[in-house]
Amino acid sequence: MKRTHQDQASQRELALALARERLKAAAPSDVAYRSGARYQPEKGASAYFELRCLNRPFQVTYPDGLVLQLDTRKPPGYALQLLILHYLVHADGHPLSGRWVAFRELPDGLIYDQAFRARVEPPLLAAFGSNLERFVGAAKALGGYKLSFGDVAFMFDALPRLPMAVIFYAGDDEFPSAVSVLYDSSAGHYLPTEDLAVLGGLLVGSLLKARLASKS
């Protein structure tokens, strides 16, 4: 049975409400410690967390769990609101491993791997595969750190304790260009795998926007 827009909106509101209830039930000092977000206790107004996601600053009120993008003073889209709330309630403070893994190596990642690769690889290759300097410019604009992998690679602080990497391999006469989107192997301690797939799509979208901004 096909869901209506009203049904989808109701499901989204329910998902946000559940995430906010989980945040409300948690001790804010514990949330800040485990997630790496900065917690500002209540001083005349509501308390809040501050964190950066894909090089953008966000504020999440506590205990209400309202998400605001600070540079625009507006709430972000539904997917990003839910992702940030899930990060705050799911993060367990596990140390980063420093070991990069493909999406399929994450918990249950193999189930979603084909859909994930279809989401991230074609748009990256279409935008940057024939001109890796464009990727370098977009990656730097997004606050990326250069890595010594492949032909061009950058690491991004997708969330405070959730780094990601994008690695390009230049093509030649025999092989086409290729790209890999990787996670620190500890990523499952900070977001469920479904949300990590969403985060990969958001990283790709941010790189494409950075590319367009650099051309304007």
Image: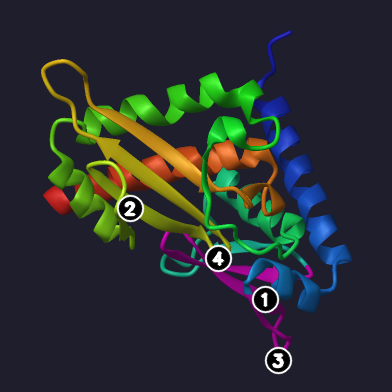
Disc 4 + disc 1, Cβ < 8 Å: no
Q: Identity of the amino acid at label 1? A: Tyr
The front one of 94 and 46 is 94
Q: Which residues are drawn in magenta?
A: 38-63
Q: Is residue 46 magenta?
A: yes
Q: Is residue 53 magenta?
A: yes
Which is more foreground, mark 4 or mark 1? 4
Q: As drawn, is 159 to the left or to the right of 95? A: left
Q: Earlier in the sequence, mark 1 or mark 3?
A: 3
The image quadrant of residue 140 is bottom left
Residue 88, percent from left and from top: 70, 61
Which is more foreground, mark 4 or mark 3? 4
Q: Earlier in the sequence, mark 4 or mark 1?
A: 1
Which is more foreground, mark 1 or mark 2? 2
Query: What residue is shown at x 55% (from left), y 65% (from top)?
Result: 160
Q: As drawn, is 152 to the left or to the right of 71? A: left
To which residue does mark 3 refer?
43
To which residue does mark 2 refer?
154
To which residue does mark 1 refer?
48
Q: Identity of the amino acid at label 3? A: Lys
Q: Identity of the amino acid at label 2? A: Phe
Q: Residue furthest bottom?
A: 43
The front one of 199 and 167 is 167
The span from disc 1 to disc 2 (Cα, nearest Å) is 31 Å
